[in-house]
């Protein structure tokens, strides 16, 4: 049971840290391919920061709140899809896509692994 608790807590914290990093990075106009701050950047930052807080709170009761993994997997997948689209359409440079894609794959892999390892345990 402690192994599952550790795996869940690791997943929550890795995803939360990634969200906090995203919350800061989306506020940097040059990183987003624009010269000035635009409204959607602020919206994305608020959502990423809030999701990170939710993951930190899930860590307080990791086994009872493991349901948080499912929507987090969806969010990370959708972020990865947005990155892929931006890369394919030429909106962001290839080197930026490579690093972002690697981060998405790593976080998504950890979350999916944790989901499958912990889905059958009882609280």
Image (cartoon, rainbow, N blue to C red):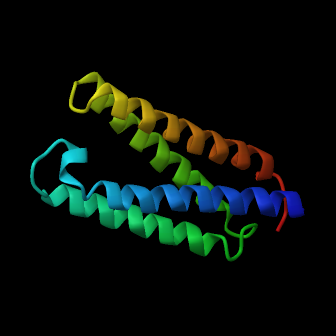
Q: In the displayed structure, does residue 43 sit left or right of residue 6? A: left
Residue under the image location 61 percent in, 55 percent down = 69
Q: Which of the 4 image quadrants contains residue 86?
A: top left
Residue under the image location 51 percent in, 34 percent down = 102
- State which quarter of the image contains the C terminus: bottom right
Q: Which of the 4 image quadrants contains residue 38?
A: bottom left
The location of residue 98, given as percent across then percent down, is: 42, 29
Residue closest to the far right: 1
The location of residue 20, given as percent across then percent down, is: 44, 63
| Depth order, front residue of 80/26 | 26
Above or below, comparing residue 110 to residue 9 in the picture: above
Q: In the displayed structure, does residue 113 sit left or right of residue 76? A: right
Residue under the image location 35 percent in, 36 percent down = 83
- State which quarter of the image contains the N terminus: bottom right
Residue under the image location 44 percent in, 35 percent down = 99
Above or below, comparing residue 77 to residue 5 in the picture: above
The location of residue 50, given as percent across then percent down, is: 42, 69
Q: Which of the 4 image quadrants contains residue 84?
A: top left
| Depth order, front residue of 29/16 | 29
């Amino acid at each position: 049971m402690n192994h599952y608790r550790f795996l869940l807590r690791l997943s929550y914290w890795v995803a939360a840290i990634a969200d906090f990093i995203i919350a800061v990075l989306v506020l940097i106009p040059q990183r987003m391919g624009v010269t000035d701050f635009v409204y959607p950047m602020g919206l994305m930052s608020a959502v990423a920061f809030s999701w990170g807080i939710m993951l930190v709170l899930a860590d307080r009761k990791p086994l009872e709140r493991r349901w948080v993994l499912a929507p987090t997997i969806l969010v990370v997948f959708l972020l990865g899809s947005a990155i892929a689209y931006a890369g394919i359409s030429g909106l962001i440079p290839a080197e930026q896509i490579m690093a972002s894609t690697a981060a998405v794959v790593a976080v998504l892999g950890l979350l999916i692994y944790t989901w499958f390892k912990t889905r059958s345990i009882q609280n």
